[in-house]
Amino acid sequence: MNAQAGLNKIYKTQIKLKNHFIMPLRNKAITKEVQDLLTPIKVLQDFIEGNSRFIRNELNTIDHKALISQTADGQHPKAIVLSCIDSRVPVELIFDQTIGDIFVARVAGNFENTDILGSMEYSCKVAGSKLVFVLGHESCGAIKAACDHVKLGNITSLLENIQPAVKLSETQVKGKHDSSNNEFIIKTTENNVQLTIQRIREKSPILKEMEENGEIKIIGGVYQISNGKVTLL
């Protein structure tokens, strides 16, 4: 069985109701055998297609009870996504994923730290995931706060992680370098994703080697809260 056949077996079970087909019913969790057949490119393509379904409001119908039962004794997720905590960015939904499909790490501003790097290494080296996806988003409050150099409790140290992106944007964008300049916010959001990916490779020899060997892919994108689309960077 090739990877595409494995995906078809999982994702394309159709149920018929009153002589009309409804959305594909997801009632099979990812197994180790299917995970082994996946490649980083195929997982990325699955994300792209899932986001397209999300935009069209054609998400898969999910048999949650079946998936809960099948994943009770183990999991074989295909990817890990590093996202912001923003409530408008429901990671599984925007990629049309479900129980057992993906790991998700969330922190305001979607930057890496030691704990998140360890979680990524576990996801890929131990649990077999094929993709590391760093997901920024439009109108990010953490990005705006970093651009405005907000000082408030523990938020101050959190925002320091985004300052490299702010400083880079200051060399690329004209006008005011604060949250009143939308172009500056957009560029800082993109830079933050790209610099995070760069630091993941620098700080994790495990992930860097896996990517160089073609075992995983490390990629990023920005989610548009205004229309639901994820744009790859």
Image (spheres, grey):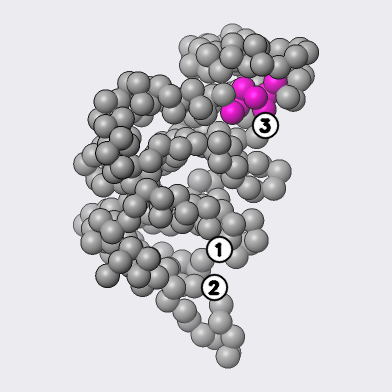
Image: 107 above or below 67: above
Residue at 54% in and 24% down: 192
Residue density around tag 3, few if under 14, some if 14–19, many if 20 or more, within 10 Å:
some
Name the residue type under label 3: Ser
> N-terminal of the two: label 3 or label 2?
2
Q: Which residues are magenta?
A: 184-190
Crowding at mark 1 (Cα within 10 Å: few <14, some 14-19, many 20+): many
Label 2 Cα neighbours within 10 Å, binned few <14 / some 14-19 / many ≥20? some
Please, what secondary structure does the residue beneath circle 1 have?
A: loop
Magenta-drawn stretch contains 210: no
Q: Position of residue 126 (x, y in %)?
A: 21, 41
The answer to whether residue 233 of the structure is visible from this angle is: yes
Residue at 32% of width from left, 36% of height from top?
A: 211
Provide the secondary structure element on which disc 2 rests: loop
Residue ID at (65%, 11%)? 171
- Relative image position of residue 35 (x, y in whole percent): 29, 56
C-alpha distance separating marks 2 and 1:
7 Å
> With 44 as the anchor, is 146 left or right in this view?
right
* Residues at marks 1 and 3, CA–CA distance in whole angstroms: 25 Å
Q: Disc 2 vs disc 1: Cβ atoms closer than 8 Å?
A: yes
The amino acid beneath tag 1 is Leu
Task: Determine the secondary structure under disc 3.
Answer: loop
Please name the amino acid that badge 2 sits on: Met
Q: Position of residue 119 (x, y in %)?
A: 31, 34
- Relative height, residue 22 to residue 186 (above, below): below
